[in-house]
Image: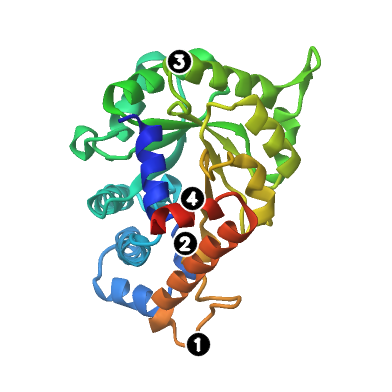
Amino acid sequence: MTFADRLHAAIRAKGTPALVGLDPRWEQLPAPLKAKAEAGGGSCYEIQARAFEEFCLRIIDVVADLVPAVKPQSAFFEDSGPAGVAALQRVIQAARDKGLIVICDAKRGDIGSTAEAYARAYLAGEDPSSAPFAADALTVNPYMGADTLQPFIDRAAACGGGLYVLVRTSNPGSGEFQNRLTEGQSLYQRVAEVVEKLNVDSHPARGYGSIGAVVGATYPEELGELRALMPHTPLLIPGYGSQGGTSADTSAGFDQAGLGAIVNSSRGIIFAHRKGPFAVADESHWESSVEAATRAMIDDLAQHTPAGRLQNCSQA
């Protein structure tokens, strides 16, 4: 099975395209968890890495039966140095052991043999033992040129892995570069064309290829435009929730069956204990907030996007 096949099978099984981002931040962790990590001693980096690992492992336990995939952000782990990198590896493996699809958000991108090394390090595809970081898929940056994508594409094809190429990102300043016009075409449109062609060339007889695109929910009109421009490309949609994107803003990213896209929420789920409708006075009960926020996202997407059709499939 290709990555797209495996991803869509997982989405159908769970009845939702909800993706939980694992972005641990020390200052927002539950107080009891931080105290436990500090009691274990060690350097500040080791303490932080220990807390991040336990936090993410407990989130995985909560959401594994609810969602098809998680997306650990490597930067937050790398911030803790070697201990954090080791924690990232164990978190990814634990998610794989629970049957979750893992998209490692590392936004790698480089030339030649360097790109090959990044690809071998992160992309395990179907077999978690085939790469140190064991991810099913990896986010990549295309802005050094299409040739820098090829080592990642080759590795993904060999191992059954997937890629998500940055096309139209959700951050407010993205348009400074991505909207620049050349011969009447924006940069993000050109990247989208390249990604779509790569999918058609790689999987000519299939619906969706395994080379995805990152397209933010914060630009819903452009999301619809890009869905039409990339009909064979699976989308990763950030920007939902804490960044201001709504479920309705993501709707144009789906096909009529409710497939073709996966929607990420990070802070709105993993730190739901801190504020909002799922906040708790006693932070020792923070996992109940994670579960409630996850279920609310699933229901929200089902109500306001074609993903609602998936719930009927999962219950059939």
The Cα atoms of the two marked residues, 4 and 1, are separated by: 30 Å
Q: Nearer the viewer, mark 4 or mark 1?
A: 4
Seen from this angle, which residue lies furthest left? 129
Using the image as rendered, state which of residue 275 and residue 192 is in the foreground.
192
The mark nearer the N terminus, 2 or 1, is: 2
Q: Which residue is mark 1?
A: 281
The residue tagged 2 is 25
Q: Earlier in the sequence, mark 3 or mark 1?
A: 3
> Badge 3: few (under 14), some or many (20 or more) residues near its Cα, within 10 Å?
few
Label 4 and label 3: CA atoms lie apart by 25 Å
Q: Which is closer to the viewer, label 3 or label 1?
A: 3
**Mark in the foreground, 4 or 3:** 3
Identify the residue position indicated by label 4 in the image: 17
Q: Are discs 4 and 3 less than 8 Å apart at CB?
A: no
Tell me the amino acid under the disc marked 1.
Answer: Ala
> Mark 3 highlights which residue?
204
- Which amino acid type corresponds to the residue marked 4 in the rendered image? Pro
Sequence-first tag of 2 and 4: 4
Q: What secondary structure is found at the residue carrying circle 4? A: loop
Q: What is the number of the mark on residue 70?
A: none
Name the spot of residue 272 as percent of width and height, x first.
52, 71
Instruction: Please state which amino acid type lies under the numbered disc 3.
Output: Pro
Which of discs 2 and 1 lies nearer the camera? The answer is 1
Residue at the far bottom: name it. 281
Mark 3 residue element: loop
Q: Secondary structure at mark 1?
A: loop
Above/below status of 277 relative to 81: below
Residue 82 as seen in the image, left or right of residue 211: left
Identify which residue is drawn at 30% across, 62% down.
57
